[in-house]
């Protein structure tokens, strides 16, 4: 920990007023754990360094050592990979200082609430959406404001009501889980420019969408945080790699509340390998999109399905005529889908799988008539 604190430049002090790039948001002062002894300047290790600083067992191989802390190169690799993708204009301006790796993007949500909201400051969420945002806000005992999405496709943000509530942090999910639709950007942008607080956009599924990401706007807006993950399109849920993109002052504040060493060497190398294999990832995304559209067309004709919501993610939200019965029949056929009736009555969310799994689902639906 001592090593980590020094490597991160964290020393025993309170942030001086006005020192943080977050001062516009009156961020709470961050107290860091005291480091014994005088703070030493950051130095590059010599090539022949003998490391006797971490109390680890030297006899049992690389996994016995703490993970590499310097992830700047991996951050640059991620940024250069996404800057070549469609809908990522503007991300070329981002550097490793704009990026934090977290243990999945859910960890990123927790970090930003812990780092950026003081007791009593409210968090706004827009149901129906990923329930974890509200869960974390409650865990941290932050007042929660719920401003429901509107419109037939649940894609319309009630920007005026959010602005009127004046929350410290607003968390949006785009494409939205469990609906699958993108939020109307004409209602998102005025929120980013009009609010006194921070806007977080969770883009866990954005690679499946043909509309642009908000990542390119991070360089322009000092109150915008974009969360990404390698768990969905990049196929690395097991590596637990989430990514927060924001201006360096915010990234620094998140880093200060992060539990050290969460991004293991095994995860780092899995991420490095996957980023060099971006062509295969993109080909699989194209395939998933085509399957999603095929499934949507077929399921829309099914008598048990009242509605297939338009999706720009790798799942479909179905409103069912006989919700309970269909859920039971899918269960009996050995097919597990997400019953999200607790978020949107009468619905289930179906992930797009491989052709075999998708056809099995369609067959189970046919039998369910
Ligand atoms: N955000 C959304 C909207 C999600 O649906 C999920 C996964 N269900 C996550 C974040 C979690 O992703 P990660 O594996 O990166 O923590």
Image (cartoon, rainbow, N blue to C red):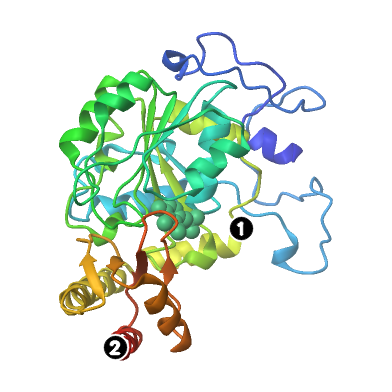
> What numbered label is drawn on residue 232?
none
Picture coordinates of residue 335 (x, y %)?
43, 83
**Neighbour tally class for label 1: few under 14, some 14-19, many 20 plus, Cα within 10 Å:** some
> What numbered label is drawn on residue 359?
2
Give the quarter of the figure containing the C terminus. bottom left
In this view, the residue in front, 128 or 111, is 128
In this view, the residue in front, 40 or 99, is 99
- Ligand 1 closer than 8 Å to the CB at disc 1? no
Residue visible at 30% across and 56% down in the picture? 179
Q: Residue furthest top?
A: 17
Picture coordinates of residue 46 (x, y %)?
66, 45
Residue visible at 25% across and 50% down in the picture? 83
Residue visible at 77% across and 28% down in the picture? 35
Relative to 192, is 287 above or below?
below
Q: Which residue carries the number 1 mark?
A: 264
Ligand 1, by image quadrant, is: bottom left
**Alpha-carbon span between mark 1 and mark 2:** 37 Å
Look at the numbered disc 2 and give the secondary structure of its residue: helix
In this view, the residue in front, 332 or 180, is 332
């Amino acid at each position: 920990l001592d090593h980590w604190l020094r490597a991160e430049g964290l020393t025993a002090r309170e942030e001086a007023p006005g020192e943080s790039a977050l001062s516009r948001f009156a961020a709470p002062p961050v107290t860091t754990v005291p480091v014994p002894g005088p703070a030493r300047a950051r130095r590059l290790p010599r090539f022949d360094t003998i490391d006797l600083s971490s109390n680890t067992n030297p006899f049992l191989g690389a996994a016995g050592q703490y993970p590499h802390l310097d992830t700047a190169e991996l951050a640059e690799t991620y940024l250069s990979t996404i800057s070549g993708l469609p809908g990522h204009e503007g991300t070329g301006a981002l550097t490793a200082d704009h990026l934090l790796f977290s243990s999945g993007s859910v960890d990123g949500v927790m970090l930003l609430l812990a780092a950026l909201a003081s007791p009593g400051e409210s968090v706004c969420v827009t149901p129906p959406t990923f329930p974890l945002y509200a869960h974390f806000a409650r865990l941290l005992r932050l007042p929660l404001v719920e401003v429901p999405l509107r419109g037939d496709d649940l894609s319309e943000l009630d920007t005026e009501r959010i602005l009127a509530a004046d929350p410290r942090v607003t968390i949006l999910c785009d494409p939205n889980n469990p609906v699958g639709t993108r939020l109307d950007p004409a209602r998102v942008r005025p929120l980013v420019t009009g609010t006194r607080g921070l806007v977080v956009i969770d883009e866990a599924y954005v690679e499946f969408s043909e509309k642009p990401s908000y990542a390119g706007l991070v360089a322009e807006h000092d109150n915008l945080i974009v969360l990404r993950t390698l768990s969905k399109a990049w196929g690395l849920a097991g590596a637990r790699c989430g990514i927060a993109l924001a201006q360096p002052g915010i990234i620094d504040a998140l880093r200060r509340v992060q539990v050290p060493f969460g991004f293991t060497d095994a995860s780092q190398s899995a991420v490095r390998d996957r980023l060099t294999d971006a062509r295969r990832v993109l080909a699989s995304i194209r395939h998933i999109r085509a399957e999603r559209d095929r499934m949507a067309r077929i399921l829309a004709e099914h008598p048990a399905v009242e509605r297939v919501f338009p999706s720009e993610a790798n799942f479909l939200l179905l409103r069912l005529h006989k919700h309970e019965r269909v859920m039971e029949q899918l269960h009996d056929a050995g097919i597990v889908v997400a019953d999200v009736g607790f978020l949107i009555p009468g619905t289930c969310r179906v992930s797009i799988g491989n052709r075999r799994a998708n056809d099995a689902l369609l067959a189970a639906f046919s039998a369910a008539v």
